[in-house]
């Protein structure tokens, strides 16, 4: 069965702290996506990871991909309140087109 | 550039009815994908259209159908609505390449009573 598992599903943390969200997937894929969703709003693309060892950084967020371990991480450095959102990873299981399987999402609350 | 737009934003229907949702992609985008988001099941892929052809389909019953027009606008139809169809329906557009970023619309909140 195709599965994309995120953990934790809920994370409450203090500003200034570091933390990592994990995304495990059960099928071979070379493309993994991270999205952010603010409450009541739609999804916004954060990162597209296309190959083993890929690392991308934007501000306080850094994502990496290990295709051999079927694992991606989203690391948050020195968290700030504005990063509070739900973060989703999604895996593209097709070879040429979009057919994304989504994780359940990690709800991140960052307290001042 | 205008973003992805979806209409209507909110919809209330009763069981057994049918509904049509509309999505206008970003200008120049040829791929439109539809997703269902619920608290219990999360985000689930419905189908993807590219140049008026369905390229991919998720595991949803035949009550869920869609189409894409020559201007890339897409519609999704759900017939014989069930209570479990209550969800946020999101569409996303991209240029159409496999490596392209998808841009999501605000969604249509469907409530089935």
Image (tube, coloured by chain):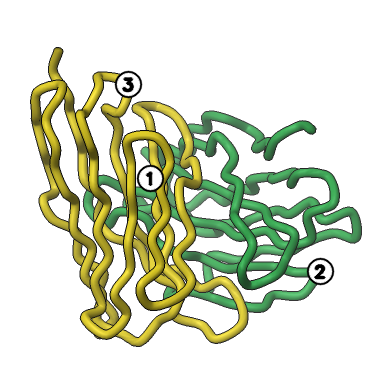
Q: Quadrant of residue A41?
A: top left
Work out whether mark 2 precedes mark 1 in sequence or the reverse, and give the earlier one.
Answer: 2
A60 versus B71 height, above or below? above
- The residue lying toward the viewer, choosing from B103 and B9, is B103
Which quadrant is the N terminus of chain B positioned in?
top right
Dot 2: chain letter: B
Task: Name the residue rendered at 11%, 38% in the picture.
Answer: A11
Disc 3 and disc 1 on one polypeptide chain: no
The chain painted yellow is: A
Hue of chain B?
green
Label 1 belongs to which residue? Answer: B86
Label 3 belongs to which residue? Answer: A82
Front: mark 2 or 3: 3
- The residue lying toward the viewer, choosing from A4 and B106, is A4
Dot 1: chain letter: B
What's the mark number on residue B43? Answer: none
Give me the C-alpha separation between circle 2 and circle 3: 39 Å
Task: Name the residue rendered at 27%, 85% in the picture.
Answer: A68
Task: Name the residue rendered at 29%, 75% in the picture.
Answer: A66
Q: What element carries label 1?
A: loop
Which quadrant is the C terminus of chain B positioned in?
top left
Dot 3: chain letter: A
Q: In this view, does B113 lie to the left or right of B46?
A: left
Q: Position of residue B18 (x, y in %)?
A: 57, 51
Q: Quadrant of residue A109?
A: top left
Task: Name the residue rendered at 70%, 53% in the picture.
Answer: B75
């Amino acid at each position: 069965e195709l599965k994309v598992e995120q953990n934790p599903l809920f994370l409450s943390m203090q500003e200034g702290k570091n933390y990592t969200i994990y995304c495990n997937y059960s099928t071979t894929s070379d493309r993994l996506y991270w999205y952010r969703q603010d409450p009541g709003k739609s999804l916004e693309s954060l990162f597209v990871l296309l190959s083993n060892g890929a690392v991308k950084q934007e501000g306080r967020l850094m994502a990496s991909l290990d295709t051999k371990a079927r694992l991606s991480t989203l690391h948050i450095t020195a968290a700030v309140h504005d990063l509070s959102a739900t973060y989703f990873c999604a895996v593209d299981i097709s070879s040429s087109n979009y057919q994304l399987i989504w994780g359940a999402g990690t709800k991140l609350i960052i307290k001042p | 550039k205008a973003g992805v737009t979806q209409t209507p934003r909110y919809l209330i229907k009763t069981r057994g009815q049918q509904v049509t949702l509309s999505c206008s992609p970003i200008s120049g985008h040829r791929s439109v994908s539809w997703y269902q988001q619920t608290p219990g099941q999360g985000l689930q892929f419905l189908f993807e259209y590219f140049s008026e052809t369905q390229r991919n389909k998720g595991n949803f019953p035949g009550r869920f159908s869609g189409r894409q027009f020559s201007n890339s606008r897409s519609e999704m139809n759900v017939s014989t609505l069930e209570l479990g169809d209550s969800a946020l329906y999101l569409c996303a557009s991209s240029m159409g390449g496999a490596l392209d970023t998808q841009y999501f619309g605000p969604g249509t909140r469907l409530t089935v009573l």
